[in-house]
Image (cartoon, grey):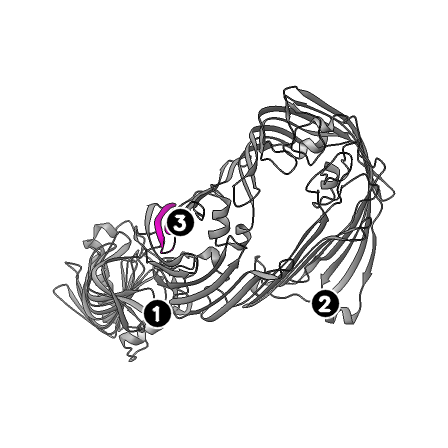
Amino acid sequence: MLRLPLVMRARTFLCITLLYLCHPQLWPQAVTKQFPPAAGTADAGEKRSSETLVQDAGISSDIPVAKVIPAPPTGVPVEIHATTQREQNNIFTLEGDVLIYYRDYTVQADKVTYNRDTGDVTAEGHIVVDGSPDNEHITATHGEMNFDRDTAHFYDVVGTLGVSSGPHNRMIFTSPNPFAFTGRELIKLGPGEYKIVDGTMTSCRLPKPDWQLLAKQINLANGKASARNSFFQLLSVPLFYLPYVTHPMGEETRSSGILLPILGNSTTKGFIIGEEVYFALSRNSDLTIGTEYFSKRGFSPMASFRYRGFGEDFFNVRFHALLDRLPAAENQGGTDILVDGRRDWGGHTRAIVDAEYLSSYVYRQAFEENYAVAINSEVKSQLFGQHALNGLAESLRLDRYQSFQNNTTNAEIRILHLPTLQFEGEDQYLGITPLMWGGVASVAGLSRSEPANAVNSATFRVHEVPRVDLYPHLALPFSAGGWTFRPEVAVRDTFYGKSQNPAPLGIVPSERDASVNRKDFEAGIDLRPPAIERDFSAPWLTRLFGGDLRHTIEPDLQYHYVSGIDNFDSILRFDDVDIASDTNELDYSVTQRLFLRHLRPHPCTGDEALGPSDLCGGGTVDWLSWQVAQKYFFNEDFGRAVTPGTRNVLTTSLDLTGVAFLTGPRNFSPVISRLRMRSSSSTDLEWDLDYDPRLGRMTASNVYAEYKKGNYAFSAGDFHLNAPEAPSVVLPTAPSPNPTSNYNQLRFSASYGRATKAGFSAGTTLGYDFVQNQFQYDAFQAGYNWDCCGLSFEMRRYSLGSVRDDTQYLYSFTLAGVGSAGSLRRAARIF
């Protein structure tokens, strides 16, 4: 702090005292002698230009999450620093590196005149003003201020709102939409209300912004800036005229209005032009409505509603459609509505909705932007509510499942649970005994419809089938000598209000208006021997992996017995409850694990920096796990539930693998292998393999590998299914040979950079079908980000048979703090 002569310090003290007495609103404040250091204070004799001050502000378009910037200490009405001070008739004249702290304002200037009676301040030369609730940072050549009324008038202005001084005088964004401006004049009319004359506004770094809006007058009020008859300028080149434009200024400020236009081109859609209107409904909800016009197909309306509540509460609705003008034989129009949300009541009750309405499968195949969704023929919807407390849970679920059979007739299998009421109890001790009890009880109303197939020419429909399922069990877990045992017994009683005429699997059933009761008794034991383990420590292991290794071998034996189900072929099938069958089986598996104990922690980088610690790599991680399992069936026909020559799916087969392997009676199941490896936060490897010794071949193999490091990301996956399939026609006397479900696809993606990276980024992704010997999907995206704007271009191609052979050229132009224009949507981006 600059030391003043004794007389000058006495005079300053007198001025402060008189100012305090003249302003009653300051009386409750406590006076302190502690003052914060002057932010941006210049040393004696140092002069800085306005441009230099703007550059020092470090305004950037990389907008972090909003931060709370602590206000300067309150309690001191005013603090003045200056080389010289004079006072006459209550008017103070300050000269030479003037620095004033007043309330939450900091003022710097070469010369300042302060009128104590009116509170007016006149400043000249290198003015810098910081503070106010709007986090002002203003530089000007001269101006007048009155901080009591929050009014001011500055000239030749450069400044920002939503930026505050942090440690070491670095500028910190306190708003996700920092507002930067210049102007011949800036008039502050009151708190949060400004007017800029002959000015510009932008979200870019000054003094050379990538883009800005130029207008004769810019009005700032209610958290947003607005201007009429403005011009948009990009890289110093005026591009277009805007009759009216708005720009948000604060963290929670969103403005309703017309968004930037959508433009694109596609071989199927033709030239694409569209527009959207955005409505900020409240602080936590918004609505976007718009439409696109395809020159070859017609209008495509769309809408999106978003709501974000407290905690994990949210609700989203997305809608898109095509009003296809092609003739009926070629028409691919349709509607797709998606709804998802969650609502929590306390810590024990929640409701979740995840629903979709799809009017046409061919519409999804032809126009869905996401490749994985476009080739998916299933539509699942559910509304789920649950209350769980003390190991007991009650839930209510409404569920609809659709499986489209083709893209020409829109035929589908539809299964409804309207509704299902379920009570579930987790295992817990029965009183003071060592026994543990648990179970599931449910009541459901079920419906199913199925189109005709090659066997049955008639469709199948059954509605409003009541089902009551009771499934309690008792267990006695114990351990001895390192061995763990869990014997268990259970009974199950399932009542159906309707049944089907006895028929094997693979045949479209017919309804029988008669109830049926299915009962069974179950027993089993889970036996786990002690795990075998060994530690490996060597200098070369530490150099190679960064630590020691522990290898464990964990065997597991499970025996399961079910008896009493003698009416399997009379049970209507809706879900996994209905495919229970008799069984007498032994399940044996071995799991090997490698644990890595890091001996050399290192500073966290990239994805590792997720926790409060600055060091990563310490502790022990489950580095690799590999499970090999198989089942042996003593009851090879599962109580006559298996139909020879037909693909059978039973509870016992689903417990092992999702690939249907039961095409007839058998003793040995396929051998399954499940490999997981995650050697670091940058690598991930998974390989699921099914080998059928009866067929002598691999029936399923899914491999996925991923690598991420810095700006580089790679992933590859091969998904191969070579499993037996049900024949097209089933004759009871002479089953036809089983054909094979042959599916083999490769997925690959690679990218450098990310959407927010400065400079160049690029990426590619593809999907190749080895059975069809063709690329079904491939795309390439490249983008470049300047200081506060970016341009991305993407070319992608779909080849899905006769339904879709389409090449699209998309682009996206992004302005920081404003939004994006173009046809490249976030869901379709590679990065």
- Closer to us: 471 or 537: 471
Q: What is the magenta range?
A: 285-303
The correct choice, above or below, for 502 with respect to 408 in the image is above
Whether residue 4 is visible here, answered yes or no, is yes
Residue 151: x and y in percent read 20, 58
View extreme (left): residue:
89
View extreme (right): residue:
481
Q: Secondary structure at mark 2?
A: helix
Q: Given the image, on which type of amino acid does mark 1 rest?
A: Arg
Residue 243: x and y in percent read 21, 59
Image disc number at residue 545: 2
Q: Which residue is mark 1?
A: 205
Q: Secondary structure at mark 3?
A: loop
Marks 1 & 3, CB-CB < 8 Å contact = no
Q: Secondary structure at mark 1?
A: loop
Q: Is residue 237 found inside the magenta-colored segment of the image?
A: no
